[in-house]
Image: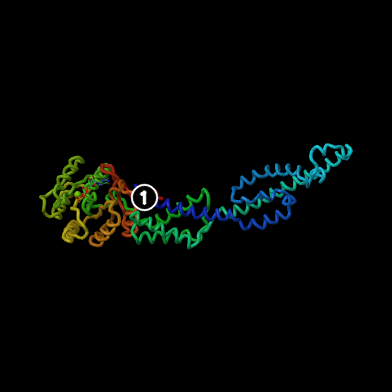
Amino acid sequence: MFDILRNKIKGFTDRLKQKINLEQGQTEKKPKSQEPFLEEQSEKSDISQSPLPEEPPFAESAEPLEEKEEKIPKSEEKILELEKETELLPPEAAEKPPETAEEPSETAEETSEIKEIEKKELDRLKVEDKREIKAAVSATSKIKSFFSSQIALSEKDLDNLLYDFELALLESDVDQDTSTFLCGKIKKELLGKKIPKGKDFDNFIKQEIKKVFAESITVEHQNIISLIKTKTDKPFVILFLGPNGAGKSTSMAKLTNILQKKNFSVIWSASDTFRAAAIEQLEKHAERLNVRLIKHKYGSDPAAVAFDAVNAAKAKKIDVVLIDSAGRQDTNQNLMEELKKIVRVIKPDLKIFVGEALSGRSLLEQAKVFDKELNIDGFVLTKIDTDTKGGTSISLLHTIKKPIFYVGIGQGYDDLIEFNSDFIVNRIV
Ligand SMILES: Nc1nc2c(ncn2[C@@H]2O[C@H](COP(=O)(O)OP(=O)(O)OP(=O)(O)O)[C@@H](O)[C@H]2O)c(=O)[nH]1
Ligand SMILES: [Mg+2]
């Protein structure tokens, strides 16, 4: 469910992360602010005159800090190597082959005195070297944390990333206006903001995107059960309308199941007198759900059937009347007039547009026409169990700004669940 949109949003977050990592990498590869420090180091240190500079201790500054700290013991090894170097030993001792050093050229007292001096000098150098390396590491650490804790994205960077993201939203069935709106809002939220790097990054970006989506698609939530409860004079009347095959009749049956569980009594109007087998289809559901069905012949006036159903409900004190209607395209003016007649005669409490999520952007266009013609109250969005893209609901909510009462998540009677904007935001971000 909504996998494509979820992946597109993840793709956007990953690209942002890549961009940030790239910048971090560049910073670490060439940490300009470390350069003078290193120069200063090499000037100050006696060791810089020795073979050590061939493997500069901080040259690989892109490595993590911990690795640098590991280098401290390594430097001790190097210092130990220095014991063998000529600088710390008397020149003649270094130049002479070992066997010549064995020659008793000095007295035993002189030799032990020299060794004592050498040892002191070595100890002094070790301490100095350690101190310098530690100072370097701690300075590097400060510089690193400065560079690596947060980043602010430039307008140019964001424009490039959001251009791709807008295309991704369009591919996921979000319409053009909504995509442009969402990207503009994300840009406004992220521009100049300090974005944490590392493990907090994903969470931060997710929260920002979630916030933008939630704000853009939140419409006043309406709960059908409370609406029914608050109506004082029975019955509460709901008209189901929308394009062919969207799931009007099935959703009506599913809602009946929900209402019966809440102890509401229900009666149906078979006002699809147009499509072959539409009445028989309802009869089967009515039998299973034990609902009374008011029906006329095929070709009769759908408004007249609905009128009879409402009157029967009034007579029997039934709580809710559900009116099925024939599927129609928004371009079919005759069928549109037929619906308008039902609305005029019955004055339903709710006109629910049933649309299937799979229809994508064409659903938005249809819904706009139905809303203009009939002023619909909200939606049931069906077949979201088979909708991998997920953009339709976002477009509907953002553009038409009417609630999605329920979503259909399968073909069973229990496969109708209440919708709120968190439902979709939590699935895609
Ligand atoms: N997977 C899935 N299938 C659904 C859902 N809702 C309805 N369907 C199926 O969609 C098909 C059409 O459903 P109907 O209720 O007959 O649609 P309709 O809008 O009444 O169709 P018309 O009366 O011909 O305009 C049926 O096979 C339903 O089982 C849903 O949420 N998920
Ligand atoms: Mg039907």
The image shows residue 156 at horizontal and vertical percentages of 48, 62
Q: According to the image, label 1 marks what residue?
A: 4
Quadrant in the rendering for residue 281 = top left
Residue 230 x %, y %: 28, 51
Element type at mark 1: helix
Query: What residue is drawn where x is 73% and y is 42%?
Result: 81
Tell me if 141 is positioned left or right of 99 in this view. Answer: left
- Picture layout, residue 254 above or below residue 347: above
Q: Looking at this view, is 15 or 383 the one in front?
A: 15
Residue positioned 68% across, 42% down in the render: 73
**Side (left or right) of 250 relative to 147:** left
In the depicted structure, whether residue 184 falls above or below residue 223? below
The residue nearer to you, when weighing 46 against 106, is: 106
Is the residue marked 1 within 8 Å of ligand 1, measured from its CB?
no
Who's the residue at 27% across and 56% down the image?
Answer: 363
Q: Locate residue 246, reporting x and y percent.
A: 24, 51
Asked if residue 263 shows in the view, the reply is no
Query: Can residue 353 be seen from the camera position used here?
Result: yes
Q: Residues within 10 Å of mark 1 (few under 14, many from 20)?
A: many
Q: Tell me how the rendering is colored.
A: rainbow
Q: Nearer the viewer, residue 346 or 376?
A: 376
Residue 97 in percent (x, y) is at 79, 40
Number of residue marks: 1
Q: Nearer the viewer, residue 88 or 101?
A: 101
Amino acid type of the residue that numbered disc 1 sits on in the rendered structure? Ile
